[in-house]
Image (cartoon, coloured by chain):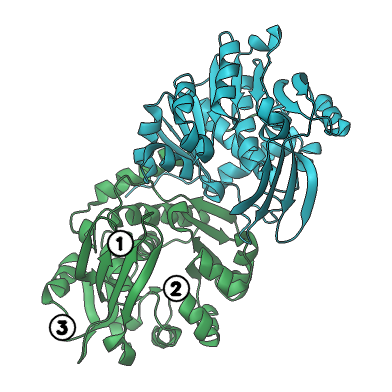
Chain colours: A green, B cyan
Amino acid sequence: MSASLLVVGSVALDSVETPYDRRDEVLGGSASFFSAVATLLGPVRLVAVVGEDFPEEHVTFLRDRGVDLAGLQRAAGKTFRWSGRYLPDMVGRETLETQLNVFEQFEPQLTPVFRGSEFVFLANIHPALQLGVLDQVKRPTLVACDTMNLWIDSQRSTLEQVLKRVDILLINDEEAVLLTGERNLLKAAPKVRALGPSRVIIKRGDAGALLFDDHGVFWTPAFPIESIVDPTGAGDSFAGGLVSFLAHRQELSPVVLRQAMIYGAAVASFCVEDFSLDRFRTLTREEVAARCQAFADLVRFEDIRL
Amino acid sequence: MSASLLVVGSVALDSVETPYDRRDEVLGGSASFFSAVATLLGPVRLVAVVGEDFPEEHVTFLRDRGVDLAGLQRAAGKTFRWSGRYLPDMVGRETLETQLNVFEQFEPQLTPVFRGSEFVFLANIHPALQLGVLDQVKRPTLVACDTMNLWIDSQRSTLEQVLKRVDILLINDEEAVLLTGERNLLKAAPKVRALGPSRVIIKRGDAGALLFDDHGVFWTPAFPIESIVDPTGAGDSFAGGLVSFLAHRQELSPVVLRQAMIYGAAVASFCVEDFSLDRFRTLTREEVAARCQAFADLVRFEDIRL
């Protein structure tokens, strides 16, 4: 039995171009990836906004997976859109266009039930919206948060208000540098933690992710994948795996946090195997369990006596 | 008791510039780093050439560490020189100048004792020289080899002759792509192995290194270091740790190979803590053992049951 889990973030229509293929106006957005992954372990509550043009089939898909859509507003206007193009290395990318659309006027409203959520993930949206959600949640057990360079640059003081109330911050390495002025991650991490989050997770793309907490540093690699189809959503899938694992275990011990990192990296490694959320349409718990075991095989070694 | 270990490669005078500091004409070269590291576990035989200008103090340093210099020629002319500048991320670098000098006429000559070496490391030099050494070694137990983009581009057929006789190839990710035409490392690795080496190790800089063999994939991270002073020689130190560990254990089992990867990464993580080979002047086996243990703490997690 998982603890209650709430995510606020974007539900989007993505147009993605890779060197090999492309998809137009497919289901995307941080909250979509997060919640699709989270439902592998239990229910999840989604807070987001879509426009009048949002295809009903996506709503059905999320609902059928067990996503509680009581917080999904449908507003006048068009759905948030993102389009991007991946470089030949399938890691670097350029954003071609971001259309905020209905997100410009979005004001998250939590139902009384949603306000009682125990685990909360603030996906990468304007920190004022993140704050608006935090103000409505009564007594969360754990608040995890993502952000991006845009908010670090332009909404610093609001973001710092959010960070004071966050337990786990997930950012990528460039954002950590931008936030702290430190290029070395071992120097950046304590500075991030001094802003509020007792734990910081620094994502390094295909080099994996590092967890910094009172117990030191933990590094999970990114699971090597032979056929990367579309990296979009890998970071949000990682967050979805991580936070839903913690909500499922209802425990924040160092042992469980490390397992949650691996679990998150495992589901993220499936995300990149297809466009949009498509890999999650068929993904089973058994497949995820097998990949967690493959992670162990990837990094384990016997003690070295010199 | 280690098996006999021989390295052929460069002994150089390096001039290194980082965003924070610089050193001119300090001891460098692949064979210097390799052999200084290897002596932590046992003796090593060095095959290289220096010029008349090579400072005697460096010869003394290597000899005092237990490097057998019977294969170090002193030739008329100037010592090989390399100069480079590191980018602010302390990972990327630009080579400012490479002066081959005495290396242009170098012909490795192995003494009868050296010809009997059991473990052989062909550091990154012209593949014709690597071949010249292989032709002199009688019956090696293990041959490991490094190379670079220059030889892949310009000496492909000679390099392929070398690879047919190599057991472990160490290259970086860009070189693996160049050698195979495959951008994905899981696709590149089997193509490299098809060229000869039963095991390939792909180095990924601060993302660590991957070992591909019949038993699958093993990933060692790069140990996170708070104060990186000079990354020069980290790859050669990794090779020195890896191959000397195998020579020391005299065993090539999957378990020992994984330990050798970690041991190599551990000594490489010390290399970057100071300029030139300076960190190795004081480094002890106990410090390396402690870092191997820290590696275990960095990556270990308990089994995940879903």
Direction from residue B197 to residue B36 in the image, left or right: right
- Give residue A36's position: percent from left, percent from top: 26, 65
The three-letter code of the residue at mark 2 reads Cys
Name the residue beneath numbered marker 1. Answer: A1
Dot placed on the residue nearer the N-terminal end, 2 or 3 = 3
Name the residue beneath numbered marker 2. Answer: A145
Spatial CA distance of label 1 from label 2 is 23 Å
Q: Are marks 2 and 3 in contact (CB under 8 Å)?
A: no
Residue at image x 81%, y 39%? B282
Instruction: Determine crowd level at label 2: few under 14, some 14-19, many 20+ residues with C-alpha closer than 10 A.
Output: many
Q: Chain of mark 2?
A: A
Under tag 1, what secondary structure?
A: loop
The three-letter code of the residue at mark 3 reads Asp
Direction from residue B151 to residue A305 in the image, left or right: right
Under tag 2, what secondary structure?
A: strand
Work out whether residue A258 or residue A195 is closer to the camera in this orientation and state it. Answer: A195
Name the residue beneath numbered marker 3. Answer: A53
Is A55 placed above or below B4 here? below
Spatial CA distance of label 2 from label 3 is 29 Å
Instruction: Determine crowd level at label 3: few under 14, some 14-19, many 20+ residues with C-alpha closer than 10 A.
Output: few
Residue at image x 43%, y 53%? A206
Dot placed on the residue nearer the N-terminal end, 1 or 2 = 1
Q: Chain of mark 1?
A: A
